[in-house]
Image (cartoon, grey):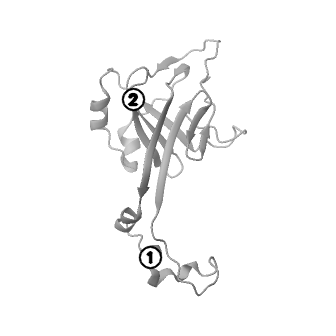
Amino acid sequence: MPFKPGDDWSIRRLISMYIFLPDEKDGLLNLMKNVKMEQSLFKEQIKLNYEKIRLLSIPKFKFECDEMKLKQHMEKLGLTIPFDSRFCKDFTGIIQPDDEVVYVSDILQKSFVEIDEDGTKAAAVTWDEVDSGYGGSKRRKRGHDFVADHPFMFMIHEEFTDSILFVGTVINPL
């Protein structure tokens, strides 16, 4: 389901939400065991079928991640200079006075995803419409019904950089 990028639908859709609904009502654990959420494997692993959906039924839910400190993770990835006061001359001109030693002590992240009647909120991303007639169109179109009435996994994916922004599960969708 593509996120609406603004009022102009001609703008390329860069962010999408994927909902992985197992065929079996108790199949979420098996699905999670078999899915590797590495960006390079995502498109190879998941065979995506783009089909018309005439009825889309997703429960309201809110997924929230507590504040996470990311300094150690960034350092493991090789990003060390911003955290070291000896090398932080790169902040000159940004902070006044220029002779003050400035460095990054930590990076904090807190995130959430919320779906309700008004759409989807994911940090600063808002989704309020989908091609398939989200909101229960009375006119029946050709296509499939998608009813998330048992546990499922969701993912918000940024298409241009092929980055996974959020991943979560809904255990009790009723």
Residue 117 vertical position relative to residue 101 in the rendered view, above or below = above
> How crowded is the residue under tag 2: few (<14 C-alpha within 10 Å), some, or many (20+)?
many
Q: Is residue 136 left or right of residue 152?
A: right
Along the viewing direction, whichever of 135 and 38 lies nearer the viewer: 135
Q: Which residue is drawn at the image coordinates 64% and 16% (left, top)?
A: 137
> How crowded is the residue under tag 1: few (<14 C-alpha within 10 Å), some, or many (20+)?
some
The disc placed on residue 53 is none
Where is residue 132, by image quadrant?
Answer: top right
The image quadrant where one finds the N terminus is top right
Q: Which residue is drawn at the image coordinates 50% and 76% (left, top)?
A: 103
Task: Count the labels in the image.
Answer: 2
Cα gap from disc 2 to disc 1, whole angstroms: 40 Å
Q: Picture coordinates of residue 48 (x, y %)?
A: 44, 33
Element marked by disc 1: helix
Q: Picture coordinates of residue 24 (x, y %)?
A: 32, 20
Earlier-in-chain disc, 2 versus 1 = 1
The disc placed on residue 152 is 2
- Residue corresponding to mark 1: 81
Element marked by disc 2: strand
The amino acid type, in three-letter code, at marker 2 is: Phe
The image quadrant where one finds the C terminus is top left
The amino acid type, in three-letter code, at marker 1 is: Ile
Q: Is residue 27 left or right of residue 174?
A: left
Q: Are marks 2 and 1 in contact (CB under 8 Å)?
A: no
Q: Is residue 70 left or right of residue 122?
A: left
